[in-house]
């Protein structure tokens, strides 16, 4: 009897890569440039001296800005094209994820984990942002792969650890939380018996990473000290946020419950000894629970900061499906149901619900600059407005977006003191674009001041959590 045709691992990885590339290159332009994307685009276009000056006061390492600077010099300056690097990085992540799962638990688990990752709306969203998160995910997943690859290598995996050290340099120059991903690597080496022989060479590699980071260490420590002492703009989390994060990783509530059930059942049936289970548990839940706990002291519990843990959750689900079913056919059926559940809840064509152009339309409908002055709170939203009005404005000098809006009588409020001085009492009408005014003026003094002199108030939520107010006498 003839044996069934079996694809090689390389062919399977190639197919998974093509699937991810095909998915993530679609609908790249469905969203307008929003949230922090205009910030990334604007500063990536500035001279290096201006970029370095900005980085001293922001929580953004330089690598991704430099990549976008190089890419935008070659590609059309359009939202879809600017997102291509993020789509590429996200698509590539499926390769090290498959390799990790395949080395630890076999092809069936690897294929399941890779497909769960491929059909996750959470990862798809970051693949379509001009931000560093998809690159962060790729590098962090490659780091786990180099650890796993080193466990079976002679000489205590010294080559793998040196490669890991070089990769970690890229990781920490991509995002400050790269140090958390390195911390996860260290705990894996410390706690997992199959990786303990790598400890010495891992520490040597870590020392090399620290040495390469020293030129940036002053900025990092300054930003870290500021976040700890002054707090962040994020609120402390509530227990429900843990469930919400798992929901994001699973596409739908019913899948969260199903996956958690499979994780518990798989861990129990295997007596927590299934191949790859320990690493998957550490990879998924240590960052999730650790960041949740730390956020009660320094709030930072955001979905984007946990991107490096999400591939671990896909691996964990796949491992526990295999441990639950044990036999090939039931395992295949369960894997198929899990992947099908992700596929039918996968909605790559949907936009993110943010449309800064609607703010412009509302502003124009109420008369715009012809009727008076408009204030923007907080100041950073001016980049989003400028990008919606004239994308090329982000390519000008650092002050150009503000100058562009100033010609339209749109002016930012940068601190609480300015909020108490609004407006000029001779104006018949004043408009305010509130895109998170509480960050600048928690007591809403701007509103109290305006409503006193201009008691007729109209308001519209023109975009997601962005309100346009019109104050008249």
Image (cartoon, rainbow, N blue to C red):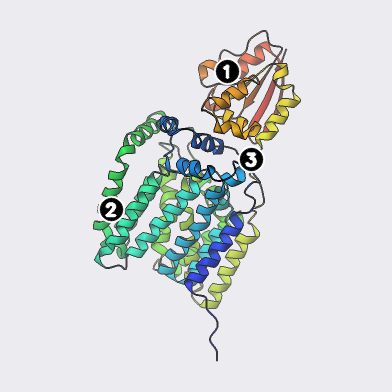
What residue is shown with label 3? 32
Q: Sequence order check: which comes first, mark 1 or mark 3?
A: 3
Q: Residue furthest front?
A: 74
Q: Nearer the viewer, mark 1 or mark 3?
A: 3
Question: Residue 412's x, y, as percent?
Answer: 57, 22
Q: Is residue 239 visible?
A: no
Q: Tell me the residue at 62%/19% (across/down).
A: 447
Report how far apart the C-alphas of labels 1 and 2 lie in the structure: 52 Å
Between residue 58 and residue 71, name the one nearer to us.
71
Q: Secondary structure at mark 1?
A: helix
Relative to 121, residue 16 above or below:
below
Q: Nearer the viewer, mark 1 or mark 2?
A: 2
Q: Are marks 3 and 2 in contact (CB under 8 Å)?
A: no
Give the quarter of the figure containing the C terminus: top right
Report how far apart the C-alphas of labels 3 and 2 lie in the structure: 41 Å
Q: How many labels were placed on the picture?
A: 3
Relative to 141, residue 292 above or below:
above
Q: Residue furthest bottom?
A: 1
User: Within 10 angstroms of label 2, few (less than 14), some, or many (20 or more) residues?
Assistant: many
Q: Secondary structure at mark 3?
A: loop
Report how far apart the C-alphas of labels 1 and 3 lie in the structure: 31 Å
What residue is shown with label 1? 445
Q: Sequence order check: which comes first, mark 3 or mark 2?
A: 3
Between residue 26 and residue 413, name the one nearer to us.
26
Tell me where residue 142 sits by quadrant: bottom left
Left or right: 431 in relation to 81: right
What residue is shown with label 2? 205
Q: Is residue 154 visible?
A: yes
User: Within 10 angstroms of label 3, few (less than 14), some, or many (20 or more) residues?
Assistant: many
Q: Tell me the residue at 50%/57% (across/down).
A: 92
Q: Tell me the residue at 56%/70% (across/down).
A: 334
């Amino acid at each position: 009897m003839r044996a069934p045709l079996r694809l090689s691992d390389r062919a399977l990885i190639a197919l998974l890569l093509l699937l991810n590339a095909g998915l993530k290159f679609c609908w790249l332009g469905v969203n307008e440039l929003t949230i922090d994307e205009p910030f990334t685009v604007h500063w990536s276009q500035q001279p290096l001296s201006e970029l370095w000056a900005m980085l001293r006061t922001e929580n953004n390492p330089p690598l991704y800005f430099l990549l976008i600077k190089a890419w935008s010099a070659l590609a059309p300056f359009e939202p879809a094209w600017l997102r291509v690097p993020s789509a590429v990085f996200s698509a590539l992540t499926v390769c090290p994820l498959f390799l990790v799962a395949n080395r630890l638990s076999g092809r069936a688990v690897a294929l399941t984990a890779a497909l769960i990752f491929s059909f996750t709306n959470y990862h798809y969203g970051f693949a379509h942002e001009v931000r560093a998160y998809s690159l962060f995910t790729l590098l962090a997943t490659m780091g786990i792969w180099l650890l796993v690859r080193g466990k079976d290598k002679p000489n205590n995996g010294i080559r793998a650890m040196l490669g890991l050290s070089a990769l970690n340099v890229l990781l920490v120059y991509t995002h400050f939380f790269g140090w958390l991903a390195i911390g996860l690597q260290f705990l894996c080496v410390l706690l997992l018996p199959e990786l303990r022989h790598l400890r010495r060479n891992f520490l040597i590699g870590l020392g090399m990473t620290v040495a390469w980071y020293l030129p940036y260490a002053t900025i990092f420590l300054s930003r870290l000290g500021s976040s700890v002492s002054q707090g962040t703009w994020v609120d402390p989390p509530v227990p429900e946020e843990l469930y919400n994060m798992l929901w994001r990783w699973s596409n739908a509530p019913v899948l969260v419950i199903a996956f958690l059930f499979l994780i518990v059942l798989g861990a129990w049936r295997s007596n927590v000894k299934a191949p790859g289970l320990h690493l998957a548990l550490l990879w998924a839940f240590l960052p999730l629970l650790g960041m949740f706990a730390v956020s009660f002291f320094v709030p930072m519990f955001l979905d984007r900061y946990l991107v490096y843990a999400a591939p671990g959750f896909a691996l964990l689900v796949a491992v526990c499906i295999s441990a639950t079913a044990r036999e090939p056919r039931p395992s295949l059926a369960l894997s198929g149901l899990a992947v099908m559940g992700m596929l039918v809840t996968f909605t790559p064509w949907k936009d993110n619900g943010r449309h800064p152009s609607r703010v412009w339309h509302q502003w124009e409908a109420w008369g715009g600059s012809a009727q008076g002055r408009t204030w923007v709170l907080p100041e950073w939203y001016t980049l989003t407005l400028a990008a919606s009005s004239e994308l090329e404005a982000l390519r000008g000098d650092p002050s150009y977006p503000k100058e562009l809006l100033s010609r339209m009588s749109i002016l930012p409020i940068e601190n609480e003191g300015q909020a108490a001085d609004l407006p000029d009492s001779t104006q018949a009408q004043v408009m305010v674009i509130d895109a998170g005014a509480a960050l600048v003026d928690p007591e809403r003094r701007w509103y109290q001041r305006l409503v006193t002199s201009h008691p007729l108030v109209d308001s519209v939520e023109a975009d997601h959590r962005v309100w346009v107010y019109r104050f008249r006498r």
